[in-house]
Image (spheres, rainbow, N blue to C red):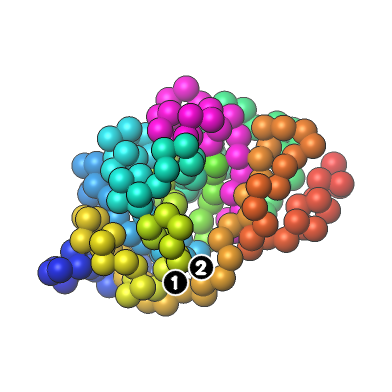
């Protein structure tokens, strides 16, 4: 572990992350800590998504407006019941695109802190593909925030070295898995309405989403 002006850093193998490193990060998350870690193409800010205090801390670190919701990462679709009120039947074909760059928005369960939803009552959910992010969600056993590790409005980071110092200094741990692919963020789809609404096109093309929906 490295410490100094840029906080605490721990290098992890991007393919087979060291279980000890993952346990260290999970322990911090369970204590209300905030970490930076690789998600897919970009680094993210992780915290216990069901801890209002931890989520507030992520918003403060990012300087994110309070009315902008924050997505969460889960280890499997079996965990969706913890944060999602219901999964509409028309949404189920899109679950086959997980894990990967697709964030699906549902009605939030009552236990979800309002701060996480930006007061909308909706929650964005994604299953990560990166081995480090997957190991974190499995080890933590609950939803963690997956918002990008950048100051709101500034460029996202495709490597730990690109994370802004003002962020690195405030988090409790950075899991450095080297450079990522970068590129667009996840495609965001609002499934609380029908027809569905594409909030943002990203890693998954709109055509793929509409093709799956037409098969139902």
> According to the image, label 2 marks what residue?
41
What's the magenta region?
99-123
> According to the image, label 1 marks what residue?
158
Residue drawn at (68%, 51%) of the image? 96
Residue drawn at (33%, 59%) of the image? 36
Label number found at residue 133: none
On the image, which quarter does residue 57 sit in? top left
Above-or-below relation of 13 to 75 = below
Q: Which percent across, then down, holds residue 92? A: 71, 40
Count of labels in the image: 2
Q: Which percent across, then down, holds residue 161? A: 32, 75
145 or 96: nearer the viewer? 145
On the image, which quarter does residue 179 sit in? bottom left
Answer whether labels 1 and 2 touch (C-beta < 8 Å): yes
1 or 75: nearer the viewer? 1
Q: Quadrant of the C terminus?
A: top right
189 or 24: nearer the viewer? 189
């Amino acid at each position: 572990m490295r410490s100094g002006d840029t906080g605490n850093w721990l290098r992890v193998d991007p393919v087979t992350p060291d279980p000890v490193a993952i346990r260290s990060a999970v322990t911090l998350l369970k204590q209300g800590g905030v970490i930076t870690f690789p998600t897919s193409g970009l680094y993210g800010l992780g915290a216990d998504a069901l801890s209002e205090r931890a989520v507030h801390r992520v918003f403060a670190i990012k300087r994110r407006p309070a009315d902008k919701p924050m997505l969460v990462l889960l280890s499997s679709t079996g965990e969706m019941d913890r944060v999602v009120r219901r999964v509409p039947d028309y949404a189920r074909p899109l679950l086959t695109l997980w894990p990967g760059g697709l964030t699906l928005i549902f009605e939030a369960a009552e236990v979800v802190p309002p701060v996480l939803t930006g007061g909308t009552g909706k929650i964005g959910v994604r299953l990560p593909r990166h081995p480090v992010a997957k190991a974190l969600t499995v080890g933590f056993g609950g939803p963690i925030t997956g918002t990008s590790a950048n100051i709101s409005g500034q460029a996202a980071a495709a490597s730990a070295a690109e994370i802004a110092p003002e962020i690195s200094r405030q988090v409790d741990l950075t899991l450095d898995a080297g450079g990522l692919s970068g590129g667009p963020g996840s495609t965001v789809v609002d499934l609380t309405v029908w027809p569905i609404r594409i909030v943002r096109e990203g890693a998954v093309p709109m055509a793929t989403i509409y093709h799956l929906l037409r098969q139902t």
